[in-house]
Image: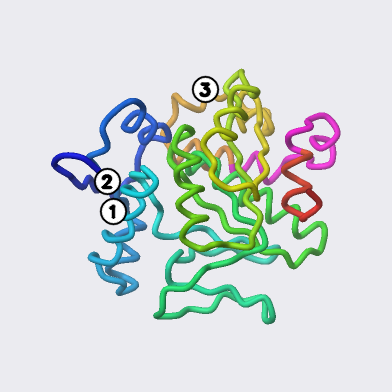
């Protein structure tokens, strides 16, 4: 981090390409926080200093100016927000144990995606896939708030936890999935990852018009995407879309 460093807090979140716009070809001198960070700092009594130190460290080490202080933990039965640095997943009981000591948080699969809409789609699809298969696998979903910054957030997560979990990257192909894959290969610093690249976007899986959705507010967009994911014919999509088939197999640990 160079020069004067600033903190920007948005309680309503950020546009899904906000981080990419801030980091692409620019000097890193700002850190983004949102409502989840303040909830972790205040409502769950972790303290603002601890949250800020985590974010500063990840910005300096990995260039991740938006490093989430919590992720979404998904199983076949339910989902909940979990704090990355203050939880421990117990493989014996299948539960998430709260702890005051910073410990590696593990899950069977760690998913890194672009934005909040993607997270809702992935969470809904994951719950359905796990439920249909009667699987007891657990999944954690982390939002990078941008496509270009996905490798930075993934590297930061991996270097923090030294996780034994597989990492699944879900990001839009934007009409050029080959170049998208090359970006991931070049940016990721570990080998234990796979990718699912819906093309041109994850909305293609849902038969939604992404341009129409962009004209709507974020809450409407997320709700429409969640509803479409809830009604999606998973088996049919597996047959016609190879990238969704990869996503499906990764959720069930068949990759």
Residue that appears at 72% across and 52% down: 251
Q: Which residue is mark 2?
A: 31
Identify the element where label 3 is drawn: helix
Label 2: element kind: strand
- Mark 1, residue position: 56
Contact flag, marks 3 and 1 (Cβ < 8 Å): no
Q: Position of residue 50 (x, y in %)?
A: 28, 67
Q: Is residue 9 or residue 226 the one in the foreground?
A: 9
Residue at image x 61%, y 51%?
123
Q: Which residue is mark 3?
A: 212
In screen coordinates, is 74 left or right of 137? left
Q: Residues within 10 Å of mark 3 (few under 14, many from 20)?
A: few
Where 108 sits versus 198, above or below? Answer: below
Residue 162 vs 61, above or below: the answer is: below
The mark nearer the N terminus, 2 or 1, is 2
- Magenta residues (range): 226-244
Q: CA distance from mark 3 to mark 1?
A: 37 Å
Are the residues at dot 2 and dot 1 in contact (C-beta closer than 8 Å)?
yes
On screen, residue 82 versus residue 4, left or right, reads right
Q: Earlier in the sequence, mark 2 or mark 3?
A: 2
For the N terminus, the image quarter is: top left
Q: Is residue 32 left or right of residue 139?
A: left
> Gap in Å between the C-alphas at discs 2 and 3?
31 Å
Circle 1 crowding by C-alpha within 10 Å: few under 14, some 14–19, many from 20: many
Residue 51 position by quadrant: bottom left
């Amino acid at each position: 981090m160079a020069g004067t460093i600033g903190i920007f807090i948005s309680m309503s979140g950020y546009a899904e390409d906000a981080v990419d716009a801030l980091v692409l070809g620019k000097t890193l001198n700002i850190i983004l926080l949102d409502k989840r960070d303040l909830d972790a700092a205040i409502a769950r009594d972790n303290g603002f200093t601890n949250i800020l130190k985590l974010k500063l460290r990840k910005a300096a080490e990995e260039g991740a100016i938006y490093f989430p202080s919590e992720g979404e933990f998904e199983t076949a039965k339910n989902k909940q927000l979990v704090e990355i640095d203050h939880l421990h997943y117990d493989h014996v009981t299948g539960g998430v144990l709260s702890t005051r000591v910073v410990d590696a948080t593990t899950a069977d699969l760690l998913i890194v995606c672009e934005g909040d809409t993607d997270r809702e789609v992935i969470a809904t699809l994951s719950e359905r896939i796990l439920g249909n298969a009667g699987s007891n696998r657990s999944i954690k979903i982390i939002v990078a708030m941008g496509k270009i910054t996905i490798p930075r957030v993934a590297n930061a997560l991996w270097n923090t936890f030294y996780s034994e979990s597989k990492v699944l990257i879900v990001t839009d192909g934007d009409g050029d999935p080959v170049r998208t894959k090359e970006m991931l290969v070049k940016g990721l610093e570990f080998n234990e990852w796979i990718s699912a690249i819906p093309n041109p976007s994850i909305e293609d899986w849902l038969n939604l018009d992404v341009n129409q959705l962009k004209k709507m507010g974020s809450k409407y967009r997320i709700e429409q995407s969640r509803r479409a994911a809830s009604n999606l014919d998973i088996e049919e999509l597996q047959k016609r879309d190879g990238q969704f088939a990869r996503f499906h197999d990764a959720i069930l640990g068949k990759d």
